[in-house]
Structures are given as C-alpha cells and as structure tokens.
Image (cartoon, grey):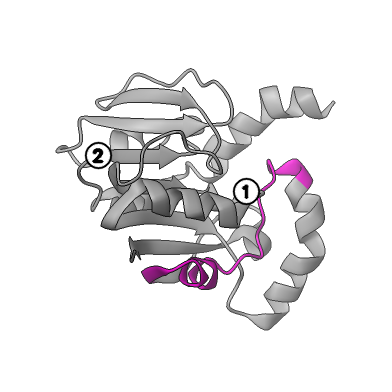
Amino acid sequence: MLNYYYKNIFPFLINKNIGNKEIIELRRKALSCAKGEILEIGIGTGLNLDLYPDSVERITAIDNYVRILPKSKVKVDFYNMSADNIAFKENTFETVVSTFCLCSITNLEKSLQEIKRVLKPNGILIFLEHGRADIKSVQLLQEISNPIFNIFAGGCNVNRNHFEILENNRFKVEGNIKRVNIFPKSITGYVYMGVAVNEK
C-alpha cells in the first residue's frame, strides 16, 4: 500500500504543496545566489530547474532514487547517490542546494559533513526547509505529529531547527523563518530559508 502511495500519490502531493506559487517564489529567491559549480541534493521532481538564474546552465544533482527529470533550461548531470555518501572530491563545488531535503535526511550530521567536504572554503549551502515553529504551542503539536507525518511525507521531519543544526556543524548561517501556506499549515507552515557559509 505504501509503495503505491509513494509511487503514484506522493509525487502529486509534493508538487501541490511545495510547488505552489508562494513556495516557487521562495525557491526562486533562494536560488538567486547560486553560482559556480553547483550540486543540488535531493533533486526530487526537478521543481528548481527552471528557477535558477539565467547564468546557471548546468548543475550536478543527486538523489536516492533514479529520476526522470523534466526538460529545462538547465542541463543536469544526475547521480543516484545519497547525501551521506557523496562520491565527489573535496572542494569541488561553490554552491550546494537543498530545498525540502535536509528535513527528510535520516543521517543528517553525516550528510552535512559530506556537504562541507565537497564545498570549497567559503562555498555556500542554499537551504529552504520545513522546520520547527517559533511558537511554543505549535512546537508541541509538531512533536506529537512528527512520527506520523514522517511516515506519510517521505521521512520529512517538521521539528528540526535548521539554524541550530547548521551552526553546530560549523556553518555560518544567514536566514529567517517564514510562515507559508502549505497543508497542513499548522504543522508544515514554517520554513527555514537562507544561506550557510562553509567555514573550514
């Protein structure tokens, strides 16, 4: 049953929720500072591809699953690869992009270590992620609902404080929390958006 759900229903829900107009504009804004050699982790259904600046013509992308990506202005070198084991050399990329991916990674600390490794010194991690609310009553609701939400949302966690996590892994973080219209809004309506600089 879950296999059918993830193959036939979940991609539709993904595009409906984190592909709505409001989120698309946040994606476009976040991606505006992407430059140089770019790695996108968890490319998913390729929602970002037409949102990169015109200066970006090619990216490298990884995901746990083989993807059939849409045609786009950006050429993609795709690798079936996990973020906690990135098979590229140190200091390869100037930009790493994660949109609604860090929230669903199981081994997050190892993945951030890998991202730091492949990023050049002072390279940037662009992030746009579901995260922990800044209101205590909503935080409690997120804690209660997270285990169930995790099952039906591809491992997504809505209770992670991404600023704190990134700073604990030696990134210099600039960003903010935004209230967004994603269903269910009370649980998933808080997104962390910003840039984390790789301080080696």
The quarter in which the N terminus is drawn is: top right
Q: Is residue 24 visible?
A: no
Q: Nearer the viewer, residue 188 or 66?
A: 66
Q: Residue under circle 2?
A: 37
Crowding near pointer 1: few (<14 within 10 Å), some, many (20+)? Answer: some
Q: Where residue 172 sits in the image (x, y, percent)?
A: 36, 71
Image: 164 above or below 149? below
Earlier in the chain: of badge 2 and badge 1, it is 2
Q: Which residue appears at 67% of the width and 62% of the height? A: 187
Q: Which residue appears at 51% of the width and 21% of the height? A: 67
Residue 11 covered by magenta stretch: no
**Range shown magenta:** 151-174
Q: Where residue 133 sits in the image (x, y, percent)?
A: 60, 72
Residue 140 left/right relative to 176: right
Q: Which residue appears at 27% of the width and 40% of the height? A: 52
Q: Residue under circle 1?
A: 104
Q: CA distance from mark 2 to mark 1?
A: 24 Å
Residue 76 falls in which quadrant of the image?
top left
Residue 143 falls in which quadrant of the image?
bottom right
Residue 99 left/right relative to 186: left
In terms of secondary structure, where does tag 1 sit? Answer: helix
> Hey, what amino acid is under mark 2?
Glu
> Hey, what amino acid is under mark 1?
Ser
Q: Residue furthest left?
A: 55
The quarter in which the C terminus is drawn is: bottom left
Residue 43: image tag = none
Q: Residue furthest right?
A: 1
Tell me the mark number nearer the camera, choosing from 2 and 1.
Answer: 2
Crowding near pointer 2: few (<14 within 10 Å), some, many (20+)? Answer: some
In terms of secondary structure, where does tag 2 sit? Answer: loop
